[in-house]
Amino acid sequence: MKKAIAMLLAVSATMALGVTALADDVAQVADTGSSSSDVSSDNSSSDASSDNSSSDTSSDNTSSDNSSSDASSDNSSSDNSSSSEDETPVGEPSSLVFHSDEDGTVLGEDLLEPGREYRFPAYVEFGGQRAKVAVSDELLKDYKFNYTRVTASGVKTFKIEERKGVYYLIIETKDTTPTKPVDVKYNVKLVRKSNNISVFSQEVKFSYGYDESNDDYINDLDKGDIVEIDNNRPVITKEQFNKIAKLNDYKNVTLAGAGWQFTVNVTDETTKNMVFTNAGVKEIMAKYPDQDFKFFRFGGKPSFNSTGKVALDVSDIVDDYESLNLYRYANGRVYQLNASYNAADETLEFRTNKLDTFFVTDRSIKDGTIIDENVVSGGSNADSNVNTDKNNPGTGAGDMINAAVMAGIASLAAAGAIAANKKSK
């Protein structure tokens, strides 16, 4: 009996172990199956997500395309706002608006330079709706502009016109050298073509000219300092000259710019425009196309009470010119000048009381040669009081004598020419 019970217990234990093992196997299989299902589900989800993402992306791209299309439409609308009747504001224009030119110059705020053309993009405003559209061909089918100059006459061009598909207010100032800004005023009317009745009239104001030298710069000068002329602020006022003269005990001072110096007494001098350029005179260059030139032009033609010494920098041409022939150009004629060559500074020096148009050339020109017949026949005597020392004795001329022209030195001196001695440099 005991043996039987023992055998039954053994069998029972064995069966229990088998059931436990079987349960573990089933659980393992179940876990594996679940994991596989999950992976499959994840992959499926990923694919679906990828599809959805692709779909979203496609949708975004379409949206982007639509957006681009809308932007294009907006741009088109913007571009054509002034030429499409549907997009032009209802009613009639009430005023003009001008944007800054390509250099950022603001009309009515910035000082315009003489001798330059400006282009200010032109718009019209519709007052009731505060809308603004560019002046266009479409607008000018029904309207036109009339211009009336109220003050000043230093403007060559003032009109609204089209340039390369855009309408601008074109302002071209005359090439003058005033000593103070010139105020200009125009009245502009927009007129209906059908009945020639004015829709609105608007005043347009601006100034052109040159700025005065900075007072802070003048006040900071010390005795004996060279007074540098800034082409952006080339006007020296009477008051500034007086300060400079007093600072230097009313003796000579040196005014200087790019490539030139003028040493002179400035006591009791009036306001002067000292603007300077190396720009050529086209009439002279056209008359002598085979010659080389270097120009020194003082547009304001400032005249002084005292005679002073001018020094012109020729360092860039002295090695290229066989001879340095110096002239003054005034009233349509060329006048010979005697000058000395300063070898140390590589400058041509001469005396005068007026800064004008001077030029150096490699060949001689007969004194008194007429360049511009129209100017000469005009009979201008504006420069009759100029004191230019044509008999200025040469100093350091030996540094400029070329062996090839030794025999002709006397005639060259009489003509105001200086031969370049390249070997001595």
Image (tube, rainbow, N blue to C red):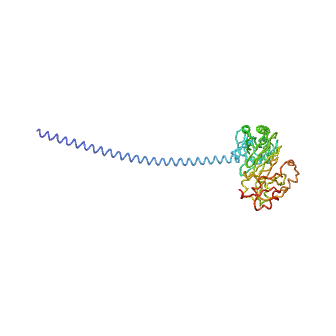
| Residue 17 % position (x, y) | 22, 42
Residue 403 sits above or below residue 71 on the image: below
Q: How many marks?
A: 0
Q: Pick whichever, 84 or 229, lies toward us.
A: 229
Visible in this render: residue 184?
Answer: no
Identity of the residue drawn at 88% across and 51% down: 379
Q: Is residue 337 left or right of residue 4?
A: right
Q: Is residue 278 left or right of residue 368?
A: left
| Residue 32 % position (x, y) | 33, 46
**Where the C terminus falls, by quadrant?**
bottom right
Write down the quadrant of residue 186 in the picture.
top right
Q: Pick whichever, 138 or 79, lies toward us.
A: 79
Write down the quadrant of residue 424 in the picture.
bottom right
| Residue 330 % position (x, y) | 83, 51
Q: Is residue 195 left or right of residue 36?
A: right
| Residue 116 % position (x, y) | 76, 48
Q: Pick whichever, 42 or 393, lies toward us.
A: 393
**Where the N terminus falls, by quadrant?**
top left
Q: Pick whichever, 128 or 206, lies toward us.
A: 206
Visible in this render: residue 352?
Answer: yes
